[in-house]
């Protein structure tokens, strides 16, 4: 457990400094733990475990968008756990299920298991992206999906480099909101 | 979409992150809220005319001490609550200290005065104005603080909303103190303390709706 915390925290600190490889490894490892966590939680309250993948992606997106709220003076595990639990309760509330049954567990349980069976989520992000405003969509497609640099994206979308960054940030937030709405049954 | 693809997409071209962003945003909002509250007080009510007398200054210092104490403690608390899991590392008891202090002082002051004065000491001249002004002036600072907290990620929305309301009420009472001519400790305890608690309750009620992310 302690090894996980140390390794993941090191990855998080590197990712906060802008290291893309660390960021990717971090999200990848966290997504496996989140999958095990959500499958266990959903099964525990008698819900369909296939919904777990939507939750994993919501939580991964939240971890990415809200990574500036991590305080490096604190351990990483409770921070991840708080986000995972918040997204679970929010999801259950949205889908009109009881959330009173979500037991308050130790923060460590989030790091307890790995699950790398990657399945498809129930929504299609590419389709949701079509609902974003043009500049947001263009910036995210260029930088996040096609892997272009900020400068290239600025030329492709016809906006400034600062505009690309702002549009990616706002676009990801809008996308997270769309995913949340989409998974509401 | 596969989670792997999402992870890959999110990791492309990431930017370094400013680690002080949360507290900086909260403190900027606090400063902006204070300026707005002072502006509303100046435009709508005006500073008390006898401000330069010793007695007025003494009570102004006392009122400011009470309200700044609240705002100071609550702001530090809010910068923690704004982060996921922050509610687990903080206890809200410290926020009650300024209230306990003013109630104690008010009780002592009542105890030293003849009971025939109590009514006047508690009700003052302008209790209704105080009761209305503090929550009204608090609205804009509350909105500014909520906007700042929305950029972070609170996971206990009731408590975070309550603390946002507490700060807004404190900032508002701070501005109102420059206008208010009711100089008695029981008045400050009941009408300042009471309206700030009212703002806190309103914040707690609005928190889950306004702060969801």
Image (spheres, helix red, strand yellow):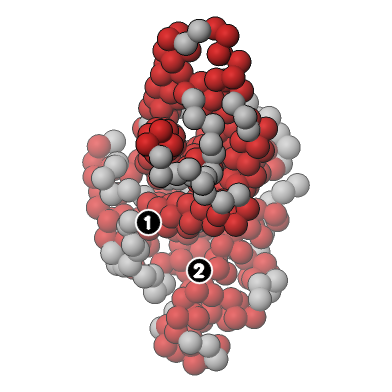
CB under 8 Å between discs 1 and 2? no
Where in the figure is residue B60, as x and y percent of width and height? 42, 38
**Left or right placement of residue B202 versus residue B168 in this view:** right
Q: Secondary structure at mark 1?
A: helix
**Left or right placement of residue B207 versus residue A10 in this view:** right
Where in the figure is residue B62, as x and y percent of width and height? 39, 32
Residue B24 badge: 1
Q: Nearer the viewer, residue A134 or B45?
A: B45
Residue pointed to by mark 2: A169
Quadrant for the N terminus of chain B, please. Answer: bottom right
Discs 1 and 2 share one subunit:
no
A7 w.r.t. A142: above or below: above
The subunit carrying tag 2 is A
**Residue at 50 percent of width and 81 percent of height:** A163
Dividing the picture into quarters, in which one does residue A45 lie?
top right
Residue A130: in sight, yes or no? yes
Residue B189: in sight, yes or no? no
Q: Secondary structure at mark 2?
A: helix
**Residue at 28 percent of width and 64 percent of height:** A17
A128 w.r.t. B181: above or below: below
B122 w.r.t. B133: above or below: above
Q: Nearer the viewer, residue B51 or A75?
A: B51
Label 1 crowd bin: few (<14), some (14–19), many (20+), radius 10 Å: some
Numbered marks: total: 2
**Residue farthest toward the right in the current orientation of the protein:** A185
Cα separation between marks 1 and 2: 19 Å
Q: Nearer the viewer, mark 1 or mark 2?
A: 1
Dividing the picture into quarters, in which one does residue B102 lie?
top left
């Amino acid at each position: 457990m302690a090894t996980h915390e140390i390794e993941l925290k090191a990855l998080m600190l590197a990712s906060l400094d802008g290291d893309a490889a660390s960021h990717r490894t971090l999200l990848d490892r966290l997504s496996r733990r989140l999958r095990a966590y959500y499958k266990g939680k959903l099964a525990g309250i008698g819900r369909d475990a296939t919904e777990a993948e939507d939750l994993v992606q919501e939580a991964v997106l939240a971890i990415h968008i809200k990574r500036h709220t991590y305080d490096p003076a604190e351990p990483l595990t409770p921070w991840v756990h708080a986000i995972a639990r918040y997204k679970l309760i929010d999801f259950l509330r949205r889908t009109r299920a009881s959330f009173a049954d979500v037991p308050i567990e130790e923060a460590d349980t989030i790091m307890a298991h790995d699950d790398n069976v990657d399945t498809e989520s129930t929504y299609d992000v590419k389709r949701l992206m079509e609902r974003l405003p043009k500049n947001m969509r263009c910036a995210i497609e260029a930088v996040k999906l096609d892997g272009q640099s900020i400068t290239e994206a600025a030329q492709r979308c016809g906006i400034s480099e600062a505009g690309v960054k702002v549009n990616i940030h706002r676009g990801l937030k809008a996308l997270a909101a769309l995913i949340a709405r989409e998974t509401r049954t | 979409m596969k989670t792997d693809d999402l992870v890959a997409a999110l990791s492309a071209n990431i930017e370094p992150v400013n680690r002080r962003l949360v507290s900086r945003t909260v403190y900027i909002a606090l400063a902006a809220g204070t300026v707005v509250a002072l502006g509303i007080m100046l435009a709508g009510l005006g500073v008390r005319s006898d401000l330069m007398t010793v007695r007025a200054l003494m009570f102004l210092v006392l009122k400011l001490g009470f309200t700044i104490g609240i705002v100071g403690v609550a702001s530090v608390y809010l910068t923690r609550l704004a982060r996921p899991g922050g509610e687990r590392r903080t206890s809200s008891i410290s926020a009650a200290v300024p209230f306990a202090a003013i109630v104690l002082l008010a009780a002592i002051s009542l105890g030293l005065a003849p009971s025939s004065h109590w009514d006047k000491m508690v009700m003052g001249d302008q209790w209704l104005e105080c009761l209305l002004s503090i929550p009204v002036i608090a609205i804009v600072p509350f909105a500014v603080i909520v906007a700042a907290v929305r950029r972070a990620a609170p996971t206990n929305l009731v408590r975070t909303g309550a603390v946002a309301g507490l700060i807004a009420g404190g900032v508002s009472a701070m501005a109102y103190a420059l206008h208010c001519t009711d100089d008695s400790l029981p008045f400050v305890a009941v009408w300042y303390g009471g309206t700030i608690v009212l703002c806190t309750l309103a914040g707690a009620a609005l928190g889950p709706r306004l702060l969801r992310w």
